[in-house]
Image (cartoon, rainbow, N blue to C red):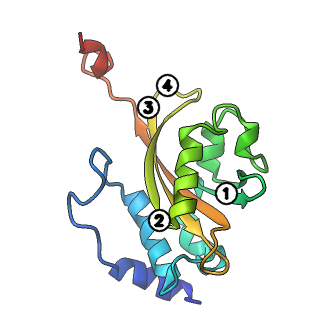
Amino acid sequence: MMDLMQLATAAALAPRPAAGSGLPGYPQSETLTHAHLLWLAARGSAEMPARRQIPASALEPLGPQLMVFGIEREPLDFRYLEIGSRMRELSNDDYTGRCLSEIPHQRAPSTVWDHLTAAMDARAPVRGVLPYVGRRRDISSIFHIVLPLAEDGETVDRLLVCVELAPVIRLQDGTHPFTQLG
């Protein structure tokens, strides 16, 4: 297992994606890229890292924007195990310990469910965009990366999700840009 200094060095030295190599229409985010680089460094030669291979201190700067989901297999479900402080503050409720199937706008079929399932099935990171549904009117979307974790290096048992919030964009006159479309 890498110590914190080795992990930080590996993440810093890891090849960065070329400009424009991201998904079309998906903004490049230092926060999400940092989370992905930590995941890549922690996995070493394994297909996926275990949660214990990513030191809490390495994730600390991202902590407020992180969530960890446990995977329930029979029937398939995703349980909120950890929710960063920023995510709890923006949520409609404290979902810690709850399963997605218990939350009407997150249970299957939903985009949240689909993104978590995609990362679990692919056993690889998945980036996505979700509409923000909450009290704050200055946030329009949630950009995220779902990083699969596997205690045995093969079977996904947790999903680490890092989130970047996208602000609502307003024109100089205060209107939303899409209200100008006919």
Please tell me whether mark 2 sits on a helix, a strand or a loop.
helix
Which is closer to the viewer, label 1 or label 2? 1
Eye-nearest disc, 1 or 3: 1
Q: Is residue 42 above or below residue 160?
A: below
Structural distance between the alpha carbons of marks 2 and 4: 27 Å
**Are the residues at dot 4 and dot 1 in contact (C-beta closer than 8 Å)?**
no
Secondary structure type for disc 4: loop
- Disc nearest the viewer among 2 and 4: 2
* Residue that carries the numbered disc 2 in the rendered image: 35
Query: What residue would you read off at disc 4?
Result: 137
76 left or right, relative to 67: right
How many residues crowd mark 1 within 10 Å: few (<14), some (14–19), many (20+)? many
Q: Nearer the viewer, residue 9 or 152?
A: 152
Q: Dividing the picture into quarters, in which one does residue 59 lie?
A: bottom right
Question: Toward which corner of the image does residue 67 lie, by quadrant?
Answer: bottom right
Amino acid type, mark 2:
Ala
Front position in the image: 146 or 122 = 122
Instruction: Give the position of the C terminus as an image quadrant.
Output: top left
Three-letter amino acid code of the residue under disc 1: Phe
Q: Residue 92: x percent and y percent? A: 67, 32
Helix, strand or loop under label 3: strand
